[in-house]
Every structure is written in structure tokens, then in C-alpha cells.
Image (cartoon, rainbow, N blue to C red):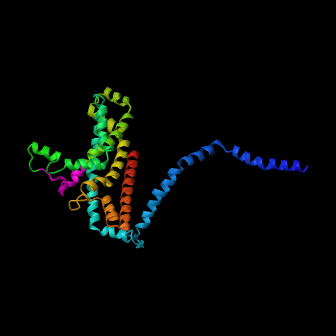
Amino acid sequence: MSLLNRENSRVTTTTPRLSGKIHISLKKQETITGWLFILPILIGFLVFVAGSVIYSLVISLTKWDLLTPPVFIGIQNYIRVFKDESFWQCMYNTVYFVIGLVPSVLILSMLTAIAINQKVNKLTSFFKVSFYIPNITSTIAVSMIWLWILNPTNGLINTLLHLIGITNTPMWLQSVVWAKPALIIMRIWQMCGYYMIMFLAGLQTIPETLYEAAEVDGARKWQKYRYITVPMLSNTTFFVTIMLIIEAFNIFEAIFVMTEGRPAGSTNTLLYYIYYNGFQYYRMGYASALAWILFAILFVLTLIQFRLRRKKEQQ
């Protein structure tokens, strides 16, 4: 009798545990599986991205040279930034790059995409690959090639200029006037292919029926571009503009390899100045404050673009 009671009690204690496992709904199982899949990325993001961002904010409130313990100084680094003449020179150079790069790459990549999308040439695939290759090539390698192209003595560009009779050729990277335009030309050549692919993807989404209806109404070719192609690419244009502004603010590798901010600081940008303070002079607190100011500028610019976009859609 006592043995029978023990068996009954064993059954009653195990049954709820088994039933608990069985009754997990399919939705919960899918949720758990999904979280398990993204867990490694989530941990990596929290540790290496979010953790680093928060740590840099803390460091920006200190004076730290990596060799001695950080000393808390409040917002002194931020106040110092706005009194720093080099910072304002870097801001001017950065804005110069943004104004030079963004509209140029935007227009050229859109025109290139429209030209390649015509599908009248058998070499279309060749041109797509040719335009895209510079973007997947390392910026360091591209910079080394352009150092030769822009060489004022025996570079490709000045040699061609001499051949057509121009003797007073620019000194390019050695000139305060020409250094920034030279870097902009190099970056335009490198960046256009990537954004051309985005515009090509946008062009594929435009229905052919719109062009057919325009032809029936007697629209000319440029009118179809103006009233159909460009408006229908507005979403792509908006995205590309945001990406280009961020990329123009973050120009670094080409300057690091080709000029190191010279001559006379004429190519010294905000991002290179952050690197310069952090890893050349070990002013980690000041460099972190500069990085947060750069983040604030990009955040505000992106926010303004979204607001303008929303207003335009509401009109």
C-alpha cells in the first residue's frame, strides 16, 4: 500500500513539468528562437558600440592622456573646442568638402545611372562594373594611385595639360588653393559608382506605363526626365543625399594617406583633427568632445532633412 502511494505521488509531481514543456505556444517558441539568433549581434552591439559610445561621452568630460588616470574637468573640453582656431579651420574645410562632394556626386551618379539604364549598348554591363570598381577598391590603394596622378612634376593630369599647351599647371596637393579640389575630384571618381547603383535600382521601380502615357501625350525626352524620372527618384535622392553628407563629413583615409592635413592645414577636416588629437597628442578627452560635436552636427543635419522632406510631402 505504501509502495502504491509513492508511485502515485511520483506521477503527480512529474506530470505538471512535462505538461509545461509541451504547452509552450508556437509563437513563444518562434520569439525565443528569434532572440537566440540575434543575441550574439546584440551582445556585440552593446559591448563594442553602445558601450564605447557611452564611454567616449564620459571620457569627453575628462582630461586623459592614456598614461595617467583621467581627471574630471566637466565641460571644459567643449568650451575649449569653440575657442580653438584649428577647429574652425577644420569646420571650414569639412563644409568645403560637403559643398564640393554632395551635389557633384549626386548629379553625376544620377546622370550616369540614367545613361546606363538606356539599355541601347551591349557594353552596359562593362560600364556598370567599371564605374563600380573604384568603390570596392581600398581607399588606401586608390589614394596611392592618385598621388601619382596628381604629382605636379610627372603626374598623369599635368602631363596631359602640358600636351595640350598649358604650361602653368596646378601644384595640386602641394597648393593651398588646389589641395581641396584635388581631393574632391579623387573622391568623386571613387564614390560615383556606388551611388550610381542605388539610382539604377530606383530607376527599375519606375513603371514603363508612365513613359508610354507621356509619349502618347507628346512629351519630349527631356520632359519625361524632368516630370517622371527625377520626381520618381525622389526617395532615392533623399537617401543618397543623407548618406553623402555623412560620408563627406567623415572623409579621412584619403587625407591620412595623401596630405596629412597639409599644406598649412588646408585639407585638415574635423574627423582627421579628432584622430590627430587622440592618437598623435593623446588628448583623448578633447578628441572625444570633438567626436560628440561631430555627431551632434550630423544628427541635426539629418533631422533637418527629414523635417524638410516631411513638409514637402505634406504640400
Residue at the far top: name it.
Answer: 216
- Evaluate whether residue 185 shows in this view: no
Q: Position of residue 145 (x, y in %)?
A: 24, 47
Residue bounds of the magenta highlight: 169-184
Residue at the far front: name it.
Answer: 3
Q: Quadrant of residue 271?
A: bottom left
Residue at (35%, 45%) from the top-left corner? 240
Q: Position of residue 269 (x, y in %)?
A: 28, 58
Q: For residue 183: magenta? A: yes
Q: Quadrant of residue 315?
A: top left
- Evaluate whether residue 137 shows in this view: yes
Q: Is residue 229 above or below residue 48?
A: above
Relative to the observer, which residue lies in front, 153 or 115?
153
Q: Position of residue 178 (x, y in %)?
A: 18, 54
Figure disc tally: 0
Relative to the observer, which residue lies in front, 227 or 284?
284
Q: Is residue 190 above or below residue 251?
A: above
Q: Specify whether 174 is left or right of 243.
A: left
Residue at (18%, 56%) from the top-left corner? 174
Residue at the far right: name it.
Answer: 1
Q: Position of residue 37 (x, y in %)?
A: 54, 46
Q: Specify whether 264 is left or right of 240.
A: left
Residue at (33%, 51%) from the top-left corner? 247
Relative to the observer, which residue lies in front, 103 or 48?
48
Q: For residue 277: magenta? A: no
Q: Quadrant of residue 53?
A: bottom left
